[in-house]
Amino acid sequence: MIPFLDLRAINQVHRADLVAAFERVLDSGWYVLGQEVEKFEASYAKWCGAAHAIGVGNGLDALSLVLRAWEIGPGDEVIVPSNTYIASWLAVTHVGATPVPVEPDVHSFNIDPNRVEAAISPRTRAIMPVHLYGRPAEMDTILQIAERHGLRVLEDGAQAHGAAYRGKKIGAHGDAVAWSFYPGKNLGALGDGGAVTTNDMGLANRLRQLRNYGSKVKYHNEEIGFNSRLDELQAALLSAKLPFVESDNQHRTRVANDYLKGLAGISSILELPSADEDLQSAWHLFVVRSKHREILMRRLAAAGVATMIHYPVPPHLQPAYATLGMARGRFPISERLHDEVFSLPIGPTQSADQTRAVIDVLTNAVASLD
Ligand SMILES: *Cc1c(COP(=O)(O)O)cnc(C)c1O
């Protein structure tokens, strides 16, 4: 059996460090907003090349707190990819603004920068590129467009810890990056967690206040804030795992390169992720496309290989967004991707033999299609 992502094995590697971190927090008697969060924020900011990191409750809050800090709300529009995990859209909706979807480039899966400008209206306040599956979005073009139109750029980095765009790590290309430390991400806590990185000190200060009841000084409230903090325990656990993300990502890259080489012969049936020398993907997911998705996934499952679909239903066709009135056919590129993509197992503990086995099973499955 080849699991999709073996979280237990991934965390067992760090068992001693995680247990030590837990004991340190347990014995400290201090569990919310203390030294562990400060230490993690400082090291995470440094790690991704940003001036500031602010720990928050989860990735969705990281996104929506930034929008809130920018005072984006009812009547405003935020440009989002039509092809993304729904959380990117939810953040916009949660502040009362309207998500304006833009279609992806069919080969990169990421927002197509050439379509962004046509979606800008007088109400547009920000652009939210998502580095989907760990692959950086086309930041240079997006930043140029934002600059021309006076828009902010909030990157959704939830799948892109350690990814780099033109040699510079994701962390502060745009005005802010929202991160998730959900257990299955490339840097995962043992529970929920999130952060924002930015070079903007004003934004950092505002976020520290917003995440903590709108308060800078205990029991003195400057604004209507939230309770969304990365807690001391998760921060301590993340500090234990952070030094290993780089080598984990290198391992993921080896798995991805093995797939790219091993599956090249069946690339007419199975479209593989496209290469781009300017980008270093974090390889959060290895997503392929095929018109024969269902049968290939069934054959893989029968041979003990777990696969998943990221994602089966695009946000505009979710019942949650029925009120936007966007019918099937409105975003055909995204819809086609959702109908054809599936993800192969990839992770920092996946062995070369396991990767080889996936390649063999998939090659046989494709051969028996006709
Ligand atoms: C996981 C994820 C989020 C949300 O993060 P949570 O911590 O689960 O709230 C947002 N955007 C993308 C692209 C994600 O993959």
Image (cartoon, grey):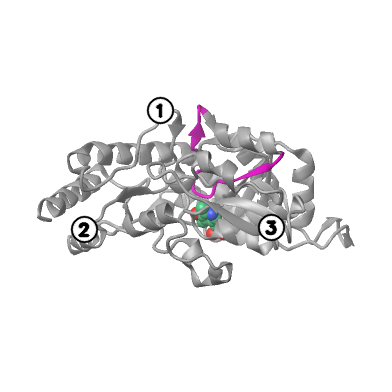
Residue annotated with mark 3? 229
In the shown orientation, is residue 37 left or right of residue 329?
A: right
Which residue is pictured at 60% across the width and 50% down the height? 79
The local crowd at label 2, few if under 14, some if 14 to 19, many if 20 or more residues have their Cα within 10 Å, is many
In the shown orientation, is residue 313 left or right of residue 126?
A: left
The amino acid beneath tag 1 is Glu
Relative to residue 107, is residue 12 depicted above or below? below
> Which mark is first along the chain, 2 or 1?
1
Q: Nearer the viewer, mark 2 or mark 3?
A: 2
User: Marks 1 and 3: CB-CB under 8 Å?
Assistant: no
Image quadrant containing the C terminus: bottom left
Q: CA distance from mark 2 to mark 3?
A: 42 Å
Residue annotated with mark 2? 296
Residue annotated with mark 1? 277
The amino acid beneath tag 2 is Leu
Q: CA distance from mark 1 to mark 3?
A: 37 Å
Magenta span: helix, strand or loop, mainly? loop
Front-lying residue, 189 or 164? 164
* Magenta region includes residue 91: no
**Label 2 secondary element:** helix
The amino acid beneath tag 3 is Arg
Query: In the figure, residue 263 lies in which quadrant?
Result: top left
The local crowd at label 1, few if under 14, some if 14 to 19, many if 20 or more residues have their Cα within 10 Å, is few
Tell me which segment is drawn in magenta. Answer: 150-167
- Residue 70 visible in the shown view: yes
Relative to residue 136, is residue 29 depicted above or below? below
Q: Position of residue 20 (x, y in %)?
A: 55, 51
Query: In the figure, residue 175 lies in which quadrant?
Result: top right
**Label 3 secondary element:** loop
Which residue is pictured at 51% across the width and 36% down the height? 138
Relative to residue 332, is residue 160 depicted above or below? above
Q: CA distance from mark 1 to mark 2?
A: 30 Å
